[in-house]
Image (cartoon, grey):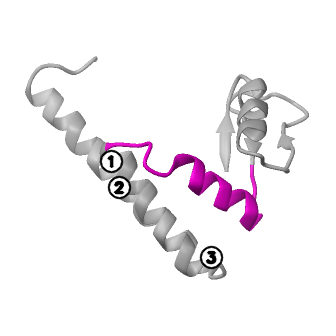
Amino acid sequence: NIAQKYYIQILEYIRNALNISANVYSPKTHKKGSKSILSTCRIDNIKFIIEYFNNTMVGVKHLEFTIWRDFFIFNKRNHAKLHAIRKEVRDMRNKHKRVYDSEMDLAGLSND
């Protein structure tokens, strides 16, 4: 899933650039906090996304993408394991962000 809060055109561009056949879901009523969503489960679309983004990221995003990519390739039919690894990657990202934020606070460089 890719979510976008304000600009549905961005999701349409991503859909076209990545050859995703699914339509962008936009809620009928735009309540505060509602988001438009682009989602695909088609293996062909996901394989194209993997090829498109392969070797294009650095740092933590590269690590997250590599974990997801390798896990998807070997476990694409096991949805429970895919959800579990997605949760692990999100937890890892959030932990990294908390550590970074606390280091910035200690250095007196926070934006607050």
Residue under label 2: 63
Residue 60, numbered circle: 1
Quadrant assignment for the C terminus: top left
The one nearer the camera, 3 or 44, is: 44
Q: N-terminal of the two: label 1 or label 3?
A: 1
Residue 90: tell me if it is visible: no
Instruction: Identify the residue shown where x is 21% and y is 44%.
Output: 99
Residue under label 3: 76
User: Residue 96's x, y, as percent?
Assistant: 27, 48
Instruction: Identify the residue shown where x is 48% and y is 63%.
Output: 68
Task: Tell me where residue 88 sits by quadrant.
Answer: bottom left
User: Residue 107's x, y, as percent?
Assistant: 8, 25
Q: Give the range drawn in magenta.
A: 39-58
User: Residue 49's x, y, as percent?
Assistant: 63, 52
Q: Are marks 2 and 1 in contact (CB under 8 Å)?
A: yes
The amino acid sitting under disc 2 is: Leu
Q: Whole-Å distance between the Cαs marked 2 and 1?
A: 5 Å
Residue 89: tell me if it is visible: yes
Instruction: Identify the residue shown where x is 84% and y is 36%.
Output: 26
The one nearer the camera, 75 or 8, is: 75
Tell me: 16 left or right of 97.
right
Q: Is residue 55 highlighted in magenta?
A: yes
